[in-house]
Image (spheres, helix red, strand yellow):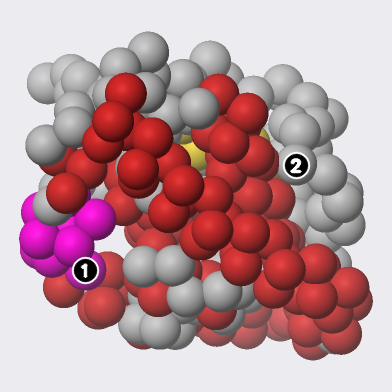
């Protein structure tokens, strides 16, 4: 049964040659990103407040502000994918708000020409409450907190997602492989989290679906540029 695509596209490709032990020091390598993203998320919150009033008055999200906030989510996703939200690649994330076609993690949100004036009053707190409950289990204080606008805490996923990434890290350490089924599940949780982050960030009126769209390619996206086959363990 086909599912309708959601207008927040989160894609990724697994690393074809993942390091066994690089994940042990990624926290150190990512410190420059953590510093930059701390400021970017403060700006994200400020821009969201301005966008709230703009949508309330004009039913439009100012395009430059929209592009900036999409860029913050895009940057966050690349860091999250490289780091402990997925451990999906060993390629160091670029320092840019723009999409980087050659990087294995991508995020895009189509610009909405009009947004509901009424929904902007309730979707970021009341309508999103069921998703907050689900994501509190999935990612604990990580992307769940980030989706509620908590600075750069989205970089340190906890909960079930954190446990699964830890299992993947151990598998990488001893086998050099990322189990395929585990990767698909991790991607599904990350994708769910980022969809909610965009929704409560007022970027879309489409309510996030309660489903895990697993795997690297988002159902609503054009597949990312192909690479060589990754050494993932076959499911089962």
Task: Specify whether residue 204 is in view.
Answer: no
Q: Give percent across and percent down for residue 163.
A: 44, 83
Q: Is residue 113 visible?
A: yes
Q: How far across and how far down the image is residue 45, in percent?
A: 51, 61
Whether 116 is drawn above or below 65: the answer is above
Residue 235 part of the magenta-drawn span: no
| Pick the front one: 55 or 142 | 55
Instruction: Report if the CB atoms under discs 2 and 1 are less than 8 Å apart.
Output: no
Q: Which mark is residue 97?
A: 2
Q: Which mark is residue 132?
A: 1
Q: How many marks?
A: 2
Residue at 50 percent of width and 38 percent of height: 10
The kind of secondary structure the magenta stretch mainly shows is: helix
Residue drawn at point x = 18 percent, y = 32 percent: 117
Q: Give the number of the disc on residue 179.
A: none
Question: What's the CA distance linking mark 2 and mark 1?
Answer: 26 Å
How many C-alpha atoms fall within 10 Å of the one at disc 1: few (<14), some, or many (≥20)? many
Does 9 appear above or below 19? above
Q: Position of residue 27 (x, y in %)?
A: 78, 83
Residue in the foreground of this view, choosing between 215 and 38: 38
Of the two numbered discs 2 and 1 on the same chain, state the one appearing first in sequence.
Answer: 2
Locate residue 127: give its quadrant: bottom left
- Tell whether 12 sits left or right of 209: right
Q: Quadrant of the N terminus?
A: top left
Where, quadrant-wise, is the C terminus in this rendering?
Answer: bottom left
Q: Which residues are magenta?
A: 123-132
Q: Is residue 22 left or right of residue 176?
A: right
């Amino acid at each position: 049964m086909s599912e309708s695509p959601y207008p927040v596209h989160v894609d990724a490709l697994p690393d074809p040659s993942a390091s066994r032990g690089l994940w042990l020091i990624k926290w150190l390598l990512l410190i420059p990103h953590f510093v930059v993203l701390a400021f970017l998320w403060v700006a994200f919150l400020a821009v969201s407040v301005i966008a709230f009033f703009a949508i309330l008055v004009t039913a439009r999200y100012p395009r430059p502000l929209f592009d900036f906030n999409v860029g913050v989510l895009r940057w966050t996703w690349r860091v999250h994918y490289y780091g402990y939200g997925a451990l999906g690649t060993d390629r160091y994330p670029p320092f840019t708000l723009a999409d980087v076609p050659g990087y294995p993690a991508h995020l895009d949100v189509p610009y909405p020409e009009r947004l509901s004036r009424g929904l902007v009053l309730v979707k970021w707190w009341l309508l999103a409450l069921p998703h907050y409950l689900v994501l509190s289990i999935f990612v604990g204080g990580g992307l769940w907190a980030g989706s509620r606008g908590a600075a750069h805490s989205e970089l340190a996923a906890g909960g079930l997602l954190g446990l699964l990434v830890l299992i993947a890290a151990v598998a990488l350490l001893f086998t050099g492989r990322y189990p395929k089924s585990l990767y698909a599940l991790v991607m599904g949780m990350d994708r769910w989290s980022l969809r909610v982050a965009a929704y409560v960030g007022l970027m879309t009126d489409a309510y996030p679906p309660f489903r895990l769209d697993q795997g690297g390619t988002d159902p609503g996206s054009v597949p990312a540029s192909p690479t060589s086959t990754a050494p993932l363990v076959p499911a089962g």
